[in-house]
Image (tube, coloured by chain):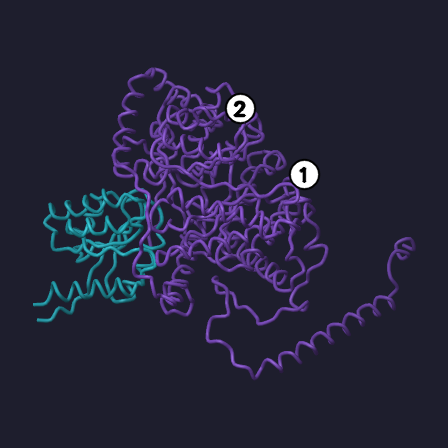
Amino acid sequence: MSDERKIRVLVAKPGLDGHDRGAKIIASAFRDAGFEVVYTGLHQTPEMIVNAAVQEDVDVVAMSVLSGAHMTLFPRVKSLLDEAGADHMLLTGGGIIPEDDVVELEQRGVGRLFGPGTSTLDAIAYVNEWFATTHAN
Amino acid sequence: MSTVEKDVLSRTDLEGLVDDRDQQIAELKARLAEWEESYDGIARRDVLFSTVSGREVKPLYTELDHASDDQSVGYPGMYPFTRGPYATMYRTRLWTMRQFAGFATAEETNERYKYLLAHGQTGLSVAFDFPTLMGYDSDHDRSLGEVGVCGVAISSLADMERLFEGIPLDQVSVSMTINGPAIILFCFYVAAAERQGVDVSVLRGTVQNDILKEYQAQHAWIYPPEPALRCIIDMFEWCSEHTPKYNPISISGYHIREAGATAAEELAFTLRNGFEYVERGIARGLDVDSFAPRLSFFFDVHNDFFEEIAKLRAARRIWARGMREKYGAKNPDSWRLRTHCQTAGVTLVAQQPENNIVRVAYQAMAAALGGTQSLHTNSMDETLALPTEKSVRIALRTQQVLAYESGVANTIDPLAGSHYVEALTDDIERDALALFEEIDEMGGVVPGIEQGWFQQEIANSAMRQQREVESAERVVVGVNHFTEGSGDIEIETLRIDPEVEERQVAKMADMRVGRDDAAVSATLTALTEACRADANVVPYILECARTYCTLFEIRAAMEEVFGSYKEPVFF
């Protein structure tokens, strides 16, 4: 049976950083691309994000981090997702994240991380491909 | 009756003048039509002829496009200040080159400040880390991973003392970018000056303290709008008596623009926020001229060169007219809009980051031609990380080349009388006034925030700009055009050692052990009572600061009465 259902995405702003331009743009773009989108609002703890992800039963958690705290926040959300039995969810995101950190986070099980100047189309294509691959049968 | 008639032109004279003017306009229109005909058959380039804010730009402007006269343009230093807030502008003093800096702990930032002062900088500008911006101590759970990362961590008077150790606060002006807990950090600063033995009445500097734009755009809030506004007016009142040279607010468009607003929205929201503070001050019973001269502004300088210049010129005119005509200010200093500017961080791109130096240079030139009083130029690597020392130096050198080599500082408002710049100044003013009406129809700024109107307008504008870039209609060099070489980013970036957080947390623990617990809890209780009693809270927070209450303790003592802000969530 082909999977006709909509891809469900949680767009999240972890930590204390209030820069939500990118989060709101990606949330709107995902919605326009046909995804079901939940946006957490600002200043979320990793626990709040994982609770929301589980409660909303999403496929993807997309975090926007511009505060430099990505090396704390991504691994924390990843391990809480795993603990909650939600390791099937894709944890991806974007922000101001140096290349070395991107590589390290990817090695630790985080999906692709997008930098400044990313086209929303690339992010949409990535999520679609991931979903098609992981939900192939 | 007859005495009046002597001073008035006769009807025939007047009709003659009108006829002459009609004749002139007809001639101008005829010449314009002739030019349009010659232009008509020629192909145009297939690009957007509009500003980044979406404002259509005509191929040619003439004197038919604007009504610049002495009433609206005038002279620098004279009402309505379109040509500049001061009579001699950069002939007397160049704009202040004020680079925003702060990272890691107070000690490390203190070293950087001493370095900057040793190299001739006369003003300091403090960047705080996110926990401080949100009113959390470095050892609070919510601060994990963010201590000292995006700025310096300041959790009590002890940190503030270390930040300015060996820097005499009666001799430097210090700008502090903080909003939600601004009143608390301001009190730490005043208490630090006291500890240095400085007479606080000589303190010069600025605290951003603009909460309205936090709800609209930047989002570092603590309390709901009404108690937050009360604290700001408490600051106006206290500062006008005790620190008369200190600016208790910097009404900021920067963050509104960075979040996605157009130039006209940035201008309108900022000035309307400014007028809101003025109304609140007057409602408190303060004489408008007792606090208005110390209100300062902060604007973004984005990519569209002429639109940004026009925006700054229009800002001064709208503010002057509003302050004099609507709010009845009598002191010319209350009419004079003084502003800091910063180049637009949002225009920096990660692809081919060296090109950002050029973007910053054009933006800096627009700020100077727009008549700014101080300027921060961004560093080329800020889309990637905190700037390195080298890239900060290039950013500062960009201002020095502009100031000393380009000639822009030689004469005042050199673009006045340009048909395009005057037309843009008029247009952007008209747009801002129309937005004022929309805001007033909603019942003012606070209802607009509560309905999410500002936030939605800004998000819509951001989305429109994003679409233009993604469709490649709006050219961004290195991003959607001229992308050869955009793949590899090889640039050195600054990193904050994770040990900074551990060291800061350890220092907090020492500080908590060394202080007088009874004094801490007594001053905090007194503060909560003052909040409840509607007293001016500044003296109470100052007492808390002196007994080494922490940022979060003070925040919490006020929160008991004030509650916390819940944002309307949408996208």
- Check the rendered structure and report the hue given to chain B: purple
Q: Quadrant of residue B419?
A: bottom right
Q: Give me the residue at 43% from left, 38% from top.
A: B178
Question: Does mark 2 fall on the same chain as mark 1?
Answer: yes
Q: Tell me the amino acid under the disc marked 2.
A: Val
Q: Tell me the amino acid under the disc marked 1.
A: Asn
Q: Which quadrant does the C terminus of chain B fall into? A: bottom left
Position of B47 with respect to B63 (left or right) is left
Which numbered disc, 1 or 2, marks the residue that appears first in the sequence? 2
Depth check: A83 or B419 in front? B419
- Residue A125 in the image: state x and y as whole percent: 23, 66
Say which residue label 2 marks. Answer: B200
- Residue B173 in the image: state x and y as whole percent: 52, 32
- Observer-side mark, 1 or 2, equals 2
Q: Give me the residue at 80% from left, 72% from top.
A: B19
Chain in cyan colour: A
Q: Chain of mark 1?
A: B
